[in-house]
Image: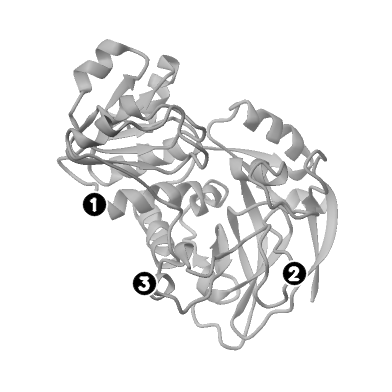
Amino acid sequence: MSLAKAYAAHSNTAPLVPFTFERRAVGAGDVRIEILYSGICHSDLHQARDDWGGAKYPMVPGHEIIGKVVEVGAEVTTLKVGDFAGVGCMVDSCRHCEACSHDLEQYCAEGATFTYNGTDRHTGETTQGGYSDHIVVEQRFVVKVSDTLDLKAAAPLLCAGITTYSPLKHFKVGPGQKVGVIGLGGLGHMGVKFAKALGAHVVMITTTPEKGADATRLGADEVLVSRDPEQMKAHAGSFDFLLNTIPVGHDTNPYMGLLKRDATMCLVGVLTELDPPLTGVSVIFGRKHLTGSAIGGMAETQEMMDFCAEHGIVSDVEVINIQDVNEAWERMAKNDVRYRFVIDMASIKG
């Protein structure tokens, strides 16, 4: 066992405060990682505030983790002490169902073990996340991180990165395609970068015209303001794929009108009801598809990290000290960040 220093929420209304707890001992297949940087995902706030139900306290959030390997078990073959490593949204799965056997652990039939607010399959205790100084994870659920990447800006790749990379790869986005990324936030800005790197013609679709310049800086070839009826009409029926990163319930029907026949819009942000509901006419006329995607499996996450190293892709981040995390959460709730907060976990020693 090892004593971890962290910040935790103790109720759905409480601020994050200093907290200590015990991590499990390093097993034969485990890796212990000194956490260097921990990204802040909007789901951290939702979980801690129990917006989705099932919150367990005390809760140490954080599933965008970059660190250095400081200890490995006797059976570890994929990493060694001194390697830079990443941990994302899950730390275990059943490993024997059909999904797991196809490297799709995020769709584990028995349910993946999430990095925090889950149940550790080894100890039965609640999992605790990356707002802490170290973590112990089985090697299958740890990815190797290239030292050519800016480590602080690489942390959000473990959630925002893989969440957008996975559907783009699954639906074979590439050269010759017109791809729209809906919503310019933590997910959307990564979607733009990945779609551009994959060779697509990228259109940033936003309700906010002021975001146009930033979208172009990130790699967008065009900007479509969805509140402008003339612009929407001009782009109707022209997209091969839409990546919808909007995190709240919204009207998807106008976006479906942008798709070509047999084309797909993929939801990666919203977990609640669509409001208003999707109409049948939006999909029937044109045989269009509305689908969703959740993070990515571990093999694909490693592929994504390697792709980022090859293409020099990282997130746009604002680095904070852990002592400022509550203020950062308040700003994140107001969308006052471009585009991801990352905690410098060295500050927890202060």
Q: What residue type is disc 3 on?
A: His
Which image quarter is the N terminus in? bottom right
Query: How far is disc 1 from disc 2 in space, using C-alphas?
Result: 39 Å
Residue 34 appears left or right of 284: right
Q: Residue at 56% of width from left, 87% of height from top?
A: 75
Query: How far is disc 2 from disc 3 in space, using C-alphas?
Result: 28 Å
Judge whether 92 appears above or below 241 on screen: below
User: Quick one: SS at disc 3?
Assistant: loop
Q: What residue type is disc 2 on?
A: Glu
Quadrant of res 218: top left
At label 2, counting other C-alpha atoms closer than 10 Å, the crowd grade (few under 14, some 14-19, many 20 or more) is few
N-terminal of the pair, mark 1 or mark 2, is 2
Quadrant of res 299: bottom left
Q: Residue at 40% of width from left, 46% of height from top?
A: 164
N-terminal of the pair, mark 2 or mark 3, is 3
User: Quick one: SS at disc 1?
Assistant: loop
User: Quick one: SS at disc 2?
Assistant: loop
At label 3, counting other C-alpha atoms closer than 10 Å, the crowd grade (few under 14, some 14-19, many 20 or more) is few
Question: Which is more toward the observer, 323 or 225?
Answer: 225
Say if residue 41 shows up in the picture: no
Say if residue 103 shows up in the picture: yes
Question: Which is more toward the observer, 211 or 84?
Answer: 211
Judge whether 78 appears above or below 66 on screen: below
Image position, residue 303 (x, y; %):
37, 62
User: Which residue carries the number 2 mark?
Assistant: 125
Q: Which mark is residue 172?
A: 1
At label 1, counting other C-alpha atoms closer than 10 Å, the crowd grade (few under 14, some 14-19, many 20 or more) is few
User: Which residue carries the number 3 mark?
Assistant: 102
Image position, residue 259 (x, y; %):
22, 33
Residue 41 appears left or right of 224: right
Q: Which mark is residue 63?
A: none
